[in-house]
Image (tube, grey):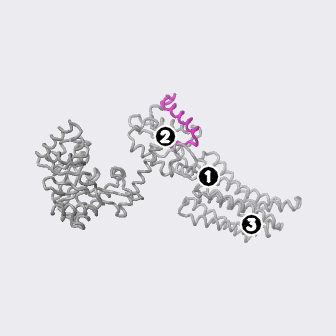
Amino acid sequence: MNITAQCCGLVLLVVLLVFYLRQKRIKLHTEKAFQRVWAFSLLNLSLDILSVVFISNMESIPLWLVKLVCKFYVASIVATAMSALVYVLEDAYSKHEKNDKKKVICFLTGVINTAIIFACPIRIVNDGAGAIYTEGPAVLVAYFFGFCIFLALALVVEFNRHSMNPRRKEAVRIWIGMWICAAAIQFVNNSLLFIGFAGAVGVMVLYVLLENPQLNIDQETGLFNQSGFHKYLEQLFDRKEKFEMICMMVPKNTTMRHGTYELMLQEIYDFLQCLPEAMVFHHSDDEIFILFSGEQQAEKGIAKIKEYFHTPVDSVKSNFIQPGFIHIKETEVIKTEEDILNIFHYIVDCHPQYDGDHFYEVTEPQIRAMYEEKEVEKLIHYAIENDRVEVFFQPIYSNKDKKFVSAEALARIRDKDGKLIPPMVFIEVAEKNGLILQLGEAVFKNVCRFIRERKPEQYGLEYIEVNLSVVQCSYSYLAKSFMEIMQQYGVDPRFINLEITESATYESKKNLLENMATLRGEGVRFSLDDFGSGQSNLNYIVDMPVDIVKFDRDMTTAYFENGKAKHVMNAAVEMIHGMNLEIVSEGVETEEQFCRLEKLGIRFIQGYYFSRPLEQDAFVEFLAKNRQMQMA
């Protein structure tokens, strides 16, 4: 009786179990599937050994009992292979709504296979020279079913090779290969009983590559690590489980003595590991995520956290380190696990009321606002990549020439329904997400294309105004980029007027002045946009080589509604004219406003009194109509 291989496999599984149970685990769905694989492998090896013992002692054991144990062993081979298939399905179809049905089908198939194996006859072989094995229809059926399961395993791995965990694919392929080799050897020579041992080694491969709990532990803090965090989140979203979550923002060590800060942090880590019903993940040096499975657990955990960080600890005063906490209660509003980090970063970056040293409750409207911003970001990407950035034009009237002499180019993009998105919305998103340079370049290209193709100078226009964002003004290669675009479309630089904002001149003055000097040397002119708003300062006009100053709509409106504003604007007009600069007044909506601004000496008027911003075709039609009226 030679059961050395089986005993070695059995010892290997027991040793793995000891290591496995001694370590904390994240409770992943693949962990349960792995535990089933381990259990069936252990059962298979135990029945293998038991069947060899029974066959060796056939003279003292009833034959029906020996055959029954042997059939249980043969059936356990199929059951072990089926558990392996279910294990792979847990990964390959974790997001599939019908995954549970697949597992039920596997279970029923296994029951049917077992019934067929038990219905088929089996023969016992003991040649007295050490060769002990089973054969017959029951064994052949087991081999056939086992081959079909292995084939299904291979097909599942192949069809899902792009979505499965790469390490799991590798481990399963090794496992399948070992099983097939062992089965082939045992099929050719029934006395070499290697299948059980091969299954045990396969379980060890799964443990080493995937299921070792240490792979999800941060060795420095003892908390679960970033990899475990993403696995656990993915499972929560796959199963649509409700949970609450806290992001703990740990402040950097700036003043504490070396060693003291680390000691305090470790004490905090030890405290977090003892939170009831909490899963705690060390995501990065300054981010720890705490997940609770329900509302009651969250309430208890948050109460303990608040108490801990406001109560001195005997050994080390952990309240010297005051982390910030961001709490998301309405996690069911969040669509994917990737959005979790986006929300935390969105709160930190976009909400100044979060000051980093207290519990900040994230509201559902804030989460929806982030999704709206992400949707706008996608639309900007699409518009830029597919040349769908639109340019509207708002005409500017000259009181001196009694005609329209220029227009302001205004960027526009649309949502999926064709509805225009407010400029302040997508411009802010583009600046925040680093798309403003691409967007600004797309706008400038469209303006140059419009000038080349529609020739607005034939309708009396002398130049087109194009807005520059704060980020564009700080871009050192702006002048070079714009000159190349103008050359590409054959546009005379003198037909371009670039509008800069006061905030832009304040934040990126050096680069802006260099760009302005280069572009002005080629004939481009500049306007100071939105004078009277934001960081309004008369020094901007003195320092910047601009040709035109634009009063923003609020300043224009205030002139007619506020006595003090009237005096301010009168003084500003006199000062600007004294420097031989022109003025454009934006936001003019009525004839009365137009007449009074004309008397004030403001040369250029822009606003709804003449026209809203128009699409290109409508704008050209507007110019042509007014040109005909002037010539009549």
Could you say where residue 532 lies in the image, as x and y percent from the top left?
23, 43
Q: In front here: 411 or 597?
A: 597
Q: Which residues are magenta?
A: 288-317
Residue behind mark 3: 142
Q: Residue drawn at (48%, 37%), measured in percent from left and top? A: 265
Cα gap from disc 1 to disc 3, whole angstroms? 28 Å
Q: Amino acid at mark 1?
A: His
Cα gap from disc 1 to disc 2, whole angstroms? 26 Å
Asked which quadrant contains residue 89, the reply is: bottom right
Residue behind mark 2: 327
- First of labels 1, 2 by sequence position: 1
Q: Is residue 609 visible?
A: yes
SS assignment at label 2? strand
SS assignment at label 1? helix
Q: Amino acid at mark 3?
A: Ala
Q: Residues within 10 Å of mark 2 (few under 14, many from 20)?
A: many
Asked which quadrant contains residue 272, the reply is: top right
SS assignment at label 3? helix
